[in-house]
Image (cartoon, rainbow, N blue to C red):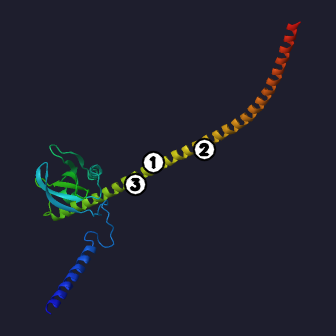
Amino acid sequence: MKTLPLFLSFCFAILVDNSIFAQVVEMDPITPQGAKNNSNSKPNIISQVYESQENMVNGPQNALIVTLEVTSEKLVEKTWKDFMKDYGGKTKGAKGGKEDMTTGASIVGIGGVNSLTIYSRTAVNMDGYVELLTWFDMGGEYLDGSRRQQYQEAEEMLLKFAHEVKMEGTKQELEDAEKKLKSFQNDMDKLKRQNNGYHRDIEDAEKKIEAAKENIVKNEEQQADTTQKIDLQTQLLEEIKRRLSELKKQ
């Protein structure tokens, strides 16, 4: 009699385990509830600034890095050069390194009355977005978080730049969308011209068909007339042959 309770307990345990397993299988551990799982879309980001020791032309130095909401390094580099012009800076390639070097930049909140030299380089992160790495040369050392006020000023400037980049990226998207729309409109104009040409071809063909029908009628009338002429000419020929035969008999 003890075996029956043990058997029932074993069956109950199996049922409970299967129920839990079914619940686990039904859960989606990756996609949040109500969210669409689209592997082609990039995650939304918010531009932020952080600091990190990074290698540059002058060795490993503290860099301020801002994540940008674009995927084009060329766009970022061009926008940075234009952005630095607003501070009086001139940007060109740094000798012996992969970075650009901006000289003569006047940013009072960071360098005071002294002009700054800023090194910069772009990189693409694992999500496909561009990051701008910047090194602020403070004269023998590079800006880091220990200079709180100057760091905050640089952070605000880089976030302002991030906004500029986002605007430029959106403008580029608009231009690309307008170009694509224009291309579609050109395709439609071409298709309409082709369609009009096909209609003209049909009209010309219909006119040729009507002309051919009229020509057939005229041709048949001419054939009937010519048939009559042939008959008359045949009769005349027979008459001439007859007369020639009689003359031979005389």
Q: Which amino acid type corresponds to the residue marked 1 in the rendered image?
A: Ser
Q: Amino acid at mark 3?
A: Leu
Q: Position of residue 175 (x, y in %)?
A: 40, 51
Name the element at disc 1.
helix
| Residue 93: numbered disc | none
The answer to whether marks 1 and 3 mark residues whose Cβ atoms lie closer than 8 Å is no
Left of 140 or right of it: where is 187? right
* Near-viewer residue (232 or 160): 232
Measured Cα–Cα span from mark 2 to mark 3: 37 Å
Measured from the top left, where is residue 237 in percent x and y? Answer: 82, 17
| Residue indicated by mark 2 | 199
Residue found at the very far front of the displayed protein: 249
The quadrant of the rendering that contains the C terminus is top right
Q: Position of residue 70 (x, y in %)?
A: 30, 56
Q: Which of 200 and 110 lies nearest the eye of the viewer?
A: 200
The residue singled out by tag 1 in the image is: 183
Q: Is residue 175 above or below residue 244?
A: below
Quick one: 143 or 70, which is closer to the camera? Answer: 70
Residue depth check, mark 2 versus mark 3: number of the one nearer the observer: 2
Which is nearer the N-term, disc 1 or disc 2? Answer: 1
Residue type at mark 2: give it: His
The mark that comes first in sequence, 1 or 3, is 3
Badge 1 vs badge 2, beta-carbon distance below 8 Å: no
User: In the rendered image, which residue does mark 3 sit on?
Assistant: 174
Task: Kindly report the distance in space between the C-alpha atoms of the residues bearing marks 1 and 2.
Answer: 24 Å
